[in-house]
Amino acid sequence: MRRLLPLIVALLATPAMAQAPRLSPEGEWLATLAGPLALAPENGVVLSFTKGRVAGSAGCNRFFGGYSLMPGLTFDGIGTTRMACTGRRAEVEAAFLAALAQVNDWRLGEDGSLELLLDGDAVLRAVPAAR
C-alpha cells in the first residue's frame, strides 16, 4: 500500500485529471467580438447557454432561441424583443445578430474564451461572465 500512495498522489495532481475537457458552451458569456466589431463590457452583449437553449442581450434587445451541437454548433428559432435602438447600441446589435446567424461551429480559445466559428474562423468571441 505504501508503494501505491505516491502513484495515487501523482495521478491526482496531474492537470489532465483535474480539468476535464469542456463538451458544450453551457454557461454565461460576455461577448468581446461580433464580426469585425470589438465589444466592450459596457456594450452588454451576453450569451447564456442552457440545455439546448440560448438567450441573452444583443446590446439593446433580448434574444432567445435554440442551439444544437450536432454537428458543430447551429442556432435555430432565434428571436428578439423589439425595442428601438439607435447609435452604438444599434450598431452592436446588428453586428452581433449578423455574426450569430453565420455560426456553424465552436471551440474554446487558448485563453478560455468561447469562439463561435464560421468555417473555422471566429465570428463571435466571448469570455466567461463574472458572477
Image (cartoon, rainbow, N blue to C red):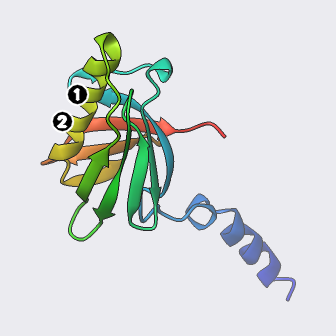
Q: In which quarter of the image is the C terminus?
A: top right
Percent coordinates x, y for residue 110 in the rendering: 41, 41
Residue depicted at x 29% and y 52% = 106
- In this rendering, position of residue 66 left or right of residue 119: right
Q: In this view, does 45 lie above or below 90?
A: below
Residue type beneath disc 1: Ala
Q: Is residue 120 above or below residue 76?
A: above
The residue nearer to you, when weighing 80 against 29, is 80
Percent coordinates x, y for residue 11 in the rendering: 67, 71
| Disc 2 crowd, CA 10 A, few/some/many (<14, 14-19, 20+) | some
Q: Evaluate whether residue 111 shows in this view.
A: no
Residue that numbered label 2 is attached to: 98
Residue 126 quadrant: top left
- In this rendering, position of residue 17 left or right of residue 28: right
Residue depicted at x 43% and y 40% = 113
Residue 93 quadrant: top left
Residue depicted at x 30% and y 10% = 87
Q: Evaluate whether residue 115 shows in this view.
A: yes
Q: Which residue lies furthest to the left in this view?
A: 119
| Disc 1 crowd, CA 10 A, few/some/many (<14, 14-19, 20+) | some
Percent coordinates x, y for residue 107 in the rendering: 33, 51
Q: Residue 94 carries which label?
A: 1
Callouts 1 and 2 close, C-beta under 8 Å: yes
